[in-house]
Amino acid sequence: MNVLHSIRVLDLGNFITGPYAAMLLAELGADVVKVERPGTGDPFRSFEGGLYSPHFQSYNRHKRSVTLDYSKPEGLEILRKLVSNADVVVLNNRPGVSEKLGVDYERLHAINRRLVYCSITGFGSDGPYASRPAYDNVGQTLSGWLSLFHDGGDPRVAGPAVSDALTGVFACMGILAALFDREKSGAGRKVDISMLEATMAFGAEPIGQYLATGQTPTRYSRGATSQAYLLECRDGKRVGLQLSSPNKFWESLANAIERPDFLQKYPDRKTRISSYEEIAKELAEIFKKRTRDEWMAVLEKNDVPFAPERKISELFDDPQILHLNLLFKSTHPVHGDVKGMRRPVRFDGQREAQLRAPPDLSEHTGEVLEELGISEDRRNDLRTRGLI
């Protein structure tokens, strides 16, 4: 169901935050036109050579690509025509860049009063850090997020982009709220979001705990509070548990592992939290006695909250993931079959939307400019002069 079928989005972003926000809107059915630089496009395109890297594909599904050099007056004029019938513009750059390019909120809003303008920055629109460059690890580091997952002298950072993705999600939420408000007010709004604020917002629990208690959470504070464990079984495979706060799940685990003494040894939640490391060591030894499949059967029988640890390469063989039909395949005229994830949101039990493969650079320039009424002769002239 394309719930945003009437919405036109201009994606002027690069890398992750802006493109991801725009892609989320595209997955809800919006017509997203990605405006890129002629010749090179989004820098994410060339991360593995060529102009169609897996990195680019991951954040640019379901879009149309237009190349336009709007740093030149004639290109800017065309962009402003695109803005005149757009609903949303998404940008992610440092403060001041949009003003230099002539695509700041004030100028674009003067063209289209109904425009929702989303500006994504690293640290906010002003302040002592505002002019600094910012990427994912910068946001994770400053927000306190990384301190919960990394310590010691190892300079390597594990895991995927977190701050970038979170910022895109919060940006999408802000855009949707502004579109809803526009239905009543008739006017668009400027939506501002920073990577720093988005990542701190996502850390609501550890920050909230600190503000309430004055105690700084450690790497294992959440695991202890939630009674969460990742345990290796006899065959080297791992299973994750989270017993949370209901006492019934602790009783279920004690039954599953055949250790009724655990109920006397760790009788209440407070004791279990303070004994987290001790319990973890005991469970580690216990789970080494059986294979994961054996443990999974026992845990399910006893209604213990658990899941097998899946590597990325194993995800689409998992029975539940297969049942949910999360993988889709679309065919690109040049690159052939391209796989991706379906959106996680359903409406009235449906989630089918426009399943468009990530676009080649400038793949849709002709059709989008034709929609603006720009003739083929003029398009050829603009192309010859490197403006599209």
Image (cartoon, rainbow, N blue to C red):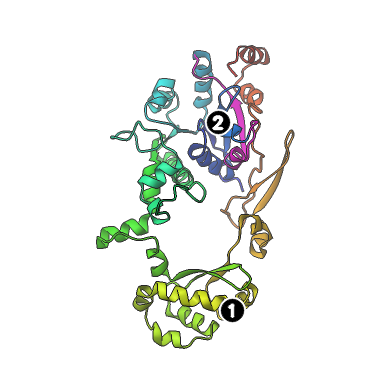
Tell me the kind of residue under disc 2: Pro
Eye-nearest disc, 1 or 2: 1
Query: Which of the two labelled residues, at mark 1 and mark 2, occupies the earlier sequence position?
Result: 2
Q: Specify the label residue 289 is tagged with.
A: 1
| Range of residues picked out in magenta | 49-72
Q: 180 above or below 97?
A: below
- The quarter of the rendered structure image containing the C terminus is top right
Say which quarter of the image contains residue 224.
Answer: bottom left
Is residue 67 among the parts visible in the rendering?
A: yes
The residue that mark 2 highlights is 43
Q: Secondary structure at mark 1?
A: loop
Residue 381 percent location from the top left of the image: 64, 11
**Which is more toward the observer, 155 or 315?**
155
The residue positioned 45% from the left and 42% from the top of the image is: 136
**Which is more toward the observer, 232 or 335?**
232
Left of 245 or right of it: where is 234? right
Q: Secondary structure at mark 2?
A: helix
Q: Residues within 10 Å of mark 1 (few under 14, many from 20)?
A: some
Left of 52 or right of it: where is 9? left
Residue 107 percent location from the top left of the image: 40, 23
